[in-house]
Every structure is written in structure tokens, then in C-alpha cells.
Amino acid sequence: MKKRKLKDVDKKIHNLLKEEERRREDGIELIPSENHTLPAVLSPLGSILSDKYAEGYPGERYYGGNEVIDKIEKLCIDRAKELFNVAHVNVQPYSGSPANQAVYFALLSLGDKIMGMELQVGGHLTHGNRVNFSGKYYQSFGYGVNGKTGKIDYKEVEKLAREKRPKLIFVGTTAYPRKLNFKRFKEIADSVGAYLCADIAHIAGLVVAGVHPSPAAHADIITTTTHKTLRGPRGGMIMVTKKGLKKDKDLPSKIDRTVFPGLQGGPHENQIAGIAACLKEAGKASFKNYAEQVVKNSKFLAEELKRNGFSLVSGGTDNHLMVIDLKDKDISGKKVQERLDEAGITVNKNTIPFDTRPPFSASGIRLGTPAVTTRGMKEKEMKEIAGFITEVIKVNNPDTTQKVKKKVKKLCNKFPIPK
């Protein structure tokens, strides 16, 4: 069969891909859950691995012809075990939400009690939100943050746990700018006999680089996505820690049986190969330098925004993200997101603790530094970016927005996305 390029097969899709490529090249990506995946990590996704069915696990497949696939998946598992210092890893979940779903189904019966951080203050849908399966099929009790500090009040978490006696506690966030005290969560979970699952989807890259504490010695199970700060393809992993294995020697088999055949069919081995490549990158000294710069950039950007008159949830950041509180600016997060989009700066509207606006409008915006750091930007550029954001928000003028857009493109041209 004659080899044909995408532009010859489907010109519309080809052109749309190019359009998105230009948008990214010319714009500043500040959504903290997004990054620029390195080309070497992307390459397996469009490879011949996309063609292969591999239901089951290495050495126990339901299809033939999986000798090479087994080697790829085992390599990915071994790299994850070493990098995160855990006893067992399942690399087959299609993404983070299916990984969390597998944990629920493996450990709980429908109607059991669970605890997780409230979505409005920085948690995730799958940690017990009422519109999600985790809040519909389980009795969910959410913990929040202190109204004055914007930080987790561990005494209140402990009080709630002792009152409700959950069987599973999730510790993990999507919009919480502070370090998580996994040791304290372990003490709380152990005091009520609950499993502790650390969802480190946002901070996985920071954890392996040593710039955020690891939950490996404290949680029973760790779940994560493989993109965000880990800078891999979109995927998910479930890890059983040495503590978890000691607590329940059947945890690995419970997890594996739930992922397949419980929730999924054939794994996406092209995705797993990409994850293996990203884990190899994450083990290098250059990745540690990258993760350290992500946090430096985040802290510097936060301080610049504060100097420019913005309020930040919890007063700052310890990690890769921050949330701007816009209540005193009399403008919604949705409106700011739209204005910044017009200037070539991508953020997302986000609720703040005790928000009075609905989530689709919100009183805050969430922004982070993983993607701009991948492009090689440092503190000097964070100062410029803070200035761009300030101009767009404080000067509500289309001409100003277009001037900022030109400045954004000029800055981005100095820092091309890795290809």
C-alpha cells in the first residue's frame, strides 16, 4: 500500500492540527494540568503499537503475538516501581479518572463511606463529588480548607474522619497550591482503619524529582496521571506501596482484576510505551532540574502577581500552580479567561474556597508553570508574564489586549516548543 501523508488523506484534519500547533507556538500555556510532551515521548503514540490487542497482563494474554508487547509493558512497570519506590504498578488505566474508579471498585462495596477534598476548594470530581460516580454510588464526606488561611486544617480532617469512619480516604488535589502532609493523612486514616489513596496526578513529576514530599511511605495506594508535571502522554497508573502490601497482601491482585477484566478491555500499548519513555526521562538529572525550575517559576510568578495587586488563594504557592482570587476585582473567572485567551494566554476559570459564583462563572482563575518551563522560560519571563496578565485584567481595552498579544508572540518566539 502506498504511504500517504495526513494532508493527502484528510486535509481538513491536517489543517486543524497545524492551526492548533500555531496557537500553542504563539501562546503562553498556563493551565497547570497541561504541558508540552517531548517528541521522543510522543512518537510511540502514533506507532504500530496502536494496532495490537493485548488483553490481560504480561505472560497472561488472551491474544497471541504479544512477546514484544510484554517486554514493553514490563519495562514500563519496572521503571515506575523504581521511580516511585513502590511494590506494584498497574500501567493499564486509560487515564486518571478510570484509575481512581478502579481503586473504589477494588476496595469498596457500593454505599461504603469515603472522604476526599471538596471540589470547590481544590479537590477532584472523582474524590466524592455528587455529580460523579464517586459521590453517587458511595457515601461521600468532603473536607475543606480553613476560611482564613486557605490551607487544609488537618485537625478538622481528623475530626470528620473520626465522626464518619470512612473506609477510604483520598488525598489529592487539582487546585490546591500548597504541599500535602501525607504523614498526617496516614495518621488520620490509620486511626479509623481506612485505606489511604494518594492521588498525585498534578504533582507526580515534582514527587519523583524530590521537590514535593512523596506519599510512598504513607499511603496504601497511589494513583496518578502521566502527563501534567510528569510530562508524558495522557494515561494513568495505580501503584500499591510497600505499606499497602503489608496491610493487605492481596491489594495488587485486587487492583489488577478490577482494571482488567473489571473495568477495561485491551490496554493501549502505544500509550504504555509512551509512558515508559516519559519515565526514563523523569529519571534523569535534567528532569530534576526541570521540576525545580517549575516550582521556582511558580513561586516567582505568584509573588509578582501579588506585587501587581492580585490576591492569591492561601497567599501563595509551594508547588506548580496558584489560584487568583478575583472577588475584589468585580469580574468573573470566566470573563478573565476569555480576555486572556484573546491575548494568547491560556488559563482556566476556577472556583475559590467558599465561592459565591457558580463553577462555570467562578471567582478565580487557575494558572501554573509546567508548560512555560518546558519551553525554557525562567524568572525573568515570569515577571513579563505577570505584567501581561496585569495589563489585560486591569485595562479592559481591546487595543491593550491586542498589544499584549503581540508581546506574547514575541516572547514565545524566543522559546520554541521542543520538537
Image (cartoon, rainbow, N blue to C red):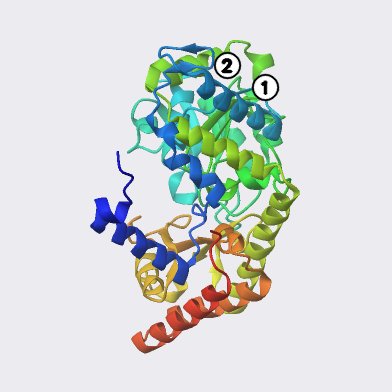
Q: Which residue is mark 1?
A: 87
For mark 2, give the secondary structure.
Answer: helix
Q: Is residue 260 visible?
A: yes
Q: For residue 342, what is the image quadrant?
A: bottom left
**Mark 2 — residue?**
252
Quadrant assignment for the N terminus: top left
Of all residues shown, which one is farthest toward the bottom? 399
Comes first in the chain, label 2 or label 1: 1
Q: Nearer the viewer, residue 350 or 411?
A: 411
Q: Residue at x 38, y 70 (%)?
A: 341
Does 275 appear above or below 248?
below
Q: Residue furthest front?
A: 2
Q: Could you tell me residue 124's position as x and y percent? A: 46, 42
Looking at numbered disc 1 in the image, what kind of residue is underneath it?
Ala
Q: Are marks 2 and 1 in contact (CB under 8 Å)?
A: yes
> At which x and y percent is residue 394?
45, 82
- Residue 48, located in which quarter of the rendered image? top left
Q: Secondary structure at mark 1?
A: loop
Which residue sits at x=41%, y=62%? Answer: 21
